[in-house]
Image (spheres, rainbow, N blue to C red):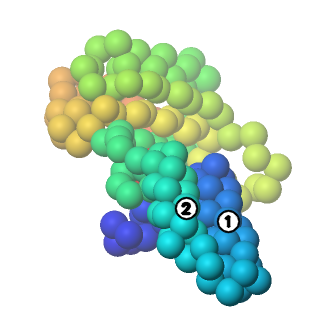
Amino acid sequence: MTTSQEGVANVSAYSKMNLISAFSCCILIRHIECNYRMKFSFVSNIIKTLLFLILFSLMPKSYSKPTQNLIRHVVCFKFKQGTLLENIQNVEKNFSALKNKINGITSLEWGTNNSPENLNKEFTHCFIVTFKDENSREKYLPHPEHQAFVSILKPILADAFVIDFTP
C-alpha cells in the first residue's frame, strides 16, 4: 500500500464529515454566485479559502501519514494431541509474563478460541503483543527471556503462525 493509500485509509468518519461539509459549502457559494451573477466572486473566493483552511486544519494528522510506530505481533498456537492442561497453562503463564520482562512491549493480550465459525484449524490460543517500535521487536526475538519461553513451548507445540502489522 502506498503512503497516499494509507493516508486515505486512515481518514476518520470525522474527517469525512469535514470533507462533505466543505463540498456542501462550496456548492452553496456556487449557487449564490450563479444567482447573483458573480457579484460576490471575490468575497466568495475568500470565504472558500477560509472554509477549506478551517476544515482541513481540523483533520487528524493520520490523514497525511501514520503517526505511530507500533507493531502488533499476533501469534497463534496449536498444541500436540494429548498435551496436559497444566503444560498449556504453563505456556499461558510464561508468555504473559514476557510483558514485564522485556522492554518495548507496551501491551500483551491473549485468549483461547471461541469463534462459532469453526475456521480455527485446531489453533486454540492467540497472543497479541504490541511493541512500541520496530527496534523493540528486533530485540524481542533473540531476547533470553523470549528464548526461555520458546524452550517451554516447543515440546508441546504442534504448529504456530505469526502475523505482524502496523496499525
Q: Secondary structure at mark 2?
A: helix
Q: Which residue is under mark 1?
A: 25
Please name the residue shown 61% across and 23% down the image: 85
Q: Quadrant of the N terminus?
A: bottom left
Please tell me the numbered disc located at residue 47: 2
Please name the residue shown 72% across and 71% down the image: 28
Which x, y percent locates residue 6?
A: 42, 63
- The amino acid type of the residue labelled 1 equals Cys
Which x, y percent locates residue 100?
A: 35, 13
- The amino acid type of the residue labelled 2 equals Ile
Tell me: residue 8, above or below residue 114: below
Q: Foreground: 30 or 146?
A: 30
- Residue 13 in the figure: left or right of residue 159: right
Please count the marks in the image.
2
Residue 8 at least partly seen = yes
**Tags 2 and 1 touching, CB below 8 Å:** yes
- Residue 156 in the figure: left or right of residue 66: right
